[in-house]
Image: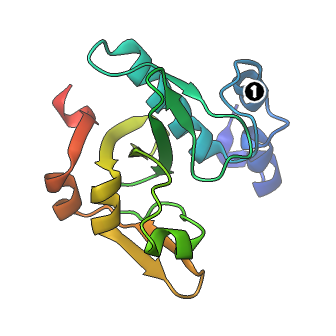
Amino acid sequence: MNIEALSINELAELISPASDAYKELQRRNVLRTRNVVGELGEYYVIDFFNKTSSLPNLSLAPPGVQNIDALSRNGEIYSIKTISSRNGTTGSFWNPESIENNEKKFDYLIIAILNKKYALDMMLQLTWTEFFEYKKFNKRMNNYNISVTKTLINNVEVIYDSNND
C-alpha cells in the first residue's frame, strides 16, 4: 500500500472505528469507546500492574463511574489519565467543589504517558495528597487537571520509564 497516495479520507479510515485494527482492539476488550488514547492507557496500566509482582492486581472499575478507572484487590481506588507526551496536561477532574473540600475521590492517580506510536513511555503514580498538591484549576473548563513537568516527574513515583529498559 502506498500510504502517500491515499486521500485524507482514506487515511482516516485506517484509524477509524471501522478499521480492522480498531475492531481487533475492541474484540480484545482494549477499546470500549472512541477514547482510543485513554483506553490504551488504562489497558497498559492494568496490564503492567497485573504482570508486576511488586504491584497490586487491578481490574477495571464499572463503566460510568467518574474519576475511577480501576480497583485493586485491597479496595484501593485508581484514577488513570493518559497523555501523549511527557510534557502534557492530563484530562479533567470534574466536581471542583468536592476537590476543593478535599473529598478524596481516589487513592492513587496513575498518569500513563504514551509515545508517538501509542506505546507506553512512562507511568507516574501520585497519592491523593500529591494530586492535591499538583492539581491546577482551569477556569474556562471549571475543572482541575495535572500538568506533567520535570518537577512533577522528579517528585512522584515513576512506576515505569521506557528509557530505563
Q: Where does the image place residue 2, in percent across and percent down from the top left?
A: 68, 37
Asked if residue 36 lies left or right of residue 102, the reply is right
Residue plotted at (69% across, 25% down): 25
Q: Nearer the viewer, residue 36 or 96?
A: 96
Residue 86 appears in the figure: no
Extreme residue toward the right, this view: 18
Asked if residue 100 lies left or right of residue 156, the reply is right
- Split into 4 quadrants, where in the image is the C terminus? top left
Q: Nearer the viewer, residue 93 or 82?
A: 93
Q: Is residue 86 above or below residue 72?
A: below
Q: Secondary structure at mark 1?
A: helix
| Quadrant of res 19 | top right
Q: Is residue 16 above or below residue 95?
A: above
Q: Is residue 149 above or below residue 72?
A: below
Residue plotted at (32% across, 40% down): 122
Residue plotted at (30% across, 12% down): 53
Q: Where does the image place residue 16, in percent across and percent down from the top left?
A: 78, 43
Circle 1 sits on which residue? 26
Colouring scheme, one of rainbow, by chain, secondary structure, one colour: rainbow
